[in-house]
Every structure is written in C-alpha cells, then in structure tokens.
Amino acid sequence: MALNYAYNFAYIDPETNMCIQFESTSNPAQGENEGWVEVPVNDPEYLFKFYINGNWYEDAEGTIPWTSSLL
C-alpha cells in the first residue's frame, strides 16, 4: 500500500524542462528548493513530462498538453 503524503513535488531539469524526479512528502519545504514545483496529486506519471511556462506537456516543444489522469 502506497503512502499518500500531503505534498507532491516534481523536479524539473533546467536544461530540458523535463521532470526527472517525483517526490511525495510530508515536508512542504521541499518546494522551496530550486527546480522543484508542487503538483496537485501523487502521480508518478509526471516523470518524463515537460513543464513549460507553468503548464505540463508530453513533448519538449510544448505542443501536446498533458494532465494527470488522477485530477
């Protein structure tokens, strides 16, 4: 059984805009670290998606919008 913590974060590679790490935690301070953005749900599908100008995409060009199926 997976634990669902209160805070979910994705680490965005600054060179590619790709999410290369996902973390669910009880520590809200994680979001204060550079490169981490808070996401609304515990969904590892954020991995390898692209975060561009505050939006999520399936492709590096930002032409295919993506939304977690858990939303």
Image: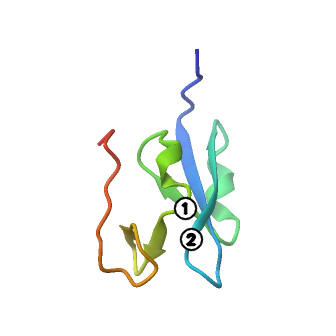
Instruction: Work out whether residue 38 or residue 21 is closer to the camera in this orientation and state it.
Output: 21
Q: Quadrant of the N terminus?
A: top right
* Residue drawn at 70 percent across, 65 percent down: 33
Q: Residue at x 36, y 80 (%)?
A: 62
11 in relation to 1, above or below:
below
Instruction: Give the vertical position of 21 relative to 3 (above or below).
Output: below
Relative height, residue 39 to residue 69 (above, below): below
Callout 2: 10 Å neighbours few (<14), some, many (20+)?
many
Residue at x-position 55% and y-position 77%: 17
Report the residue marked by disc 1: 48
Quickly name the residue at label 2. Answer: 18
Decide which of 54, 32 is in the foreground and name it. 54
Q: Amino acid at mark 2?
A: Met
Q: Position of residue 42 (x, y in %)?
A: 49, 39
Q: Earlier in the sequence, mark 1 or mark 2?
A: 2
Q: What's the residue type where badge 1 is placed?
A: Phe
Q: Secondary structure at mark 1?
A: loop
